[in-house]
Amino acid sequence: MKRIIWTFWVFALALSALWFFADTLWPAQSNYFALRTVWIQYSGVLAIGTMSVAMVLATRPAWLEPRLNGLDKMYRLHKWLGIAALAAATVHWLWAQGTKWAVGWGWLTRPARKPRAEADSMGSIESALRGWRGLAEDLGEWAFYAVAVLLVLALLKRFPYRLFAKTHHWMAAIYLVLAFHTLVLVQFTYWAQPVGWALAMLLASGTVSAVWVLLGRIGAQRTARGVIESLQAYPALNVLETTLRMDPGWPGHRPGQFAFAMSNPKEGPHPYTLASAWVPEDRRITFITKALGDHTRRLPERLRVGDRVTVEGPYGCFTFDDGRARQIWIGAGIGITPFIARMKFLAQHEGQDARPIDLFHPTSDVDPKAIEKLRADSQAAGVALHLFIDKKDGRLTGERLRAMVPGWKDASVWFCGPTAFGRALRADLLAQGLEPEAFHQELFEMR
């Protein structure tokens, strides 16, 4: 989390600093309309800058994953950038439209327009851009309304994921409109200064990314096909275990990673954690999915052995890499999935990781068959399993965890489960002396 927080603020402050080298929020001509002009420029630069980076992240660039500590963190940064872009764009819109309304209502008097410079004195490029101003303003206004609606829908968790994925796709087309709006209306003198150079790079990378999205090329080079070999339902848990045999082209994965799977093009790809270790000889992968929405609830009815599935990935850096003397795993509910994959890997590679590992599995639902398989996996991997069934054992807390693992300060903690639960455990353990970098949390939220 710290890495993406720093990335967000460093980018916002760096872009602001470049703008301040070129302009000022306190113009020498201290009247409302002069102030409005610079605030429109500043808020517009921030809005399109943050949206450009968000557009690049939307393409799931593999080269950025290790630098931002996984696609889950990249998507969290993408979300923050989207919210920041909406906030800056709202300020931009209020300065632009609010002033027009105030003039229309008689609250403000617009100053007399200065004589426009002759086209030949402006230069051919500036003159051409000046001719597009009216269209750029109108398109930018309507694009802002569309962006506001789509971003609000993206933040509403009750809005179905399949509809979110389809409507959010339109953001790429709207971005291109806003890029045109920016190109025409940004202060022309900026282009000869560092803020203009940065803006040009942002617009170029955002435009390429938007076209990539519209062409449906996201993850195209990391996509393979597979066939469903088996389906195992656990009704008490509302969970379905699906095993695929992959065609050549799947590069393999590490335990703890996830992939986007698509069994129905109308639904589109959905992200699922991989619950199996990769064995190149048999090319099988397993997903464990919980019925958390309309799509996952319908999977047991729709999927059949023999169905073809498209898989994109793998993604994620929740891969248990550290140099600590021991590890503590916490898989809450369906968050147990990456730990199942890791246990299968350890069972297949005996002696590769001999340090003590404690696995805590808090759950409110119990299926005897699933618990039996979990116990077998933990025993084969040499992992100490601690079950916390809510009705019988109560809730897992930091205090109970510390009491059960005396050497917890020497351990790294790997958490996958409800975000709020993870935050509470992290705060408790850090308050008692755990180093911040020793706590790893999978932020498995794609919106």
Image (cartoon, helix red, strand yellow):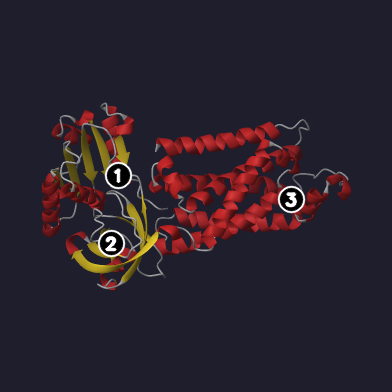
Q: Can you tell which mark lies on residue 364?
A: none
Tell me: 346 left or right of 139.
left
* Residue at the image position 18 percent from the left and 32 percent from the top: 402
Q: Which of marks 2 and 3 is nearer the N terminus?
A: 3
Q: Which of marks 1 and 2 is nearer the N terminus?
A: 2
Looking at the image, which is closer to me, 386 or 354? 354
Give the mark toward the camera: 2 or 3. 2
Q: For residue 177, which quarter of the picture?
A: bottom right
- Are the residues tagged 1 and 2 within 8 Å (C-beta)? no
Tell me: 163 left or right of 27.
left
User: How far apart, in angstroms, are the residues tagged by discs 1 and 3?
Assistant: 60 Å
Give the amino acid type for the residue marked by disc 3 in the picture.
Answer: Trp
User: How far apart, in angstroms, are the residues tagged by discs 1 and 2?
Assistant: 25 Å
Give the amino acid type for the residue marked by disc 1 in the picture.
Answer: Thr
Instruction: Locate residue 166, reporting x and y percent.
Output: 47, 64
Instruction: Locate residue 403, reporting x and y percent.
Output: 15, 32
Q: Say which residue label 1 marks.
A: 319
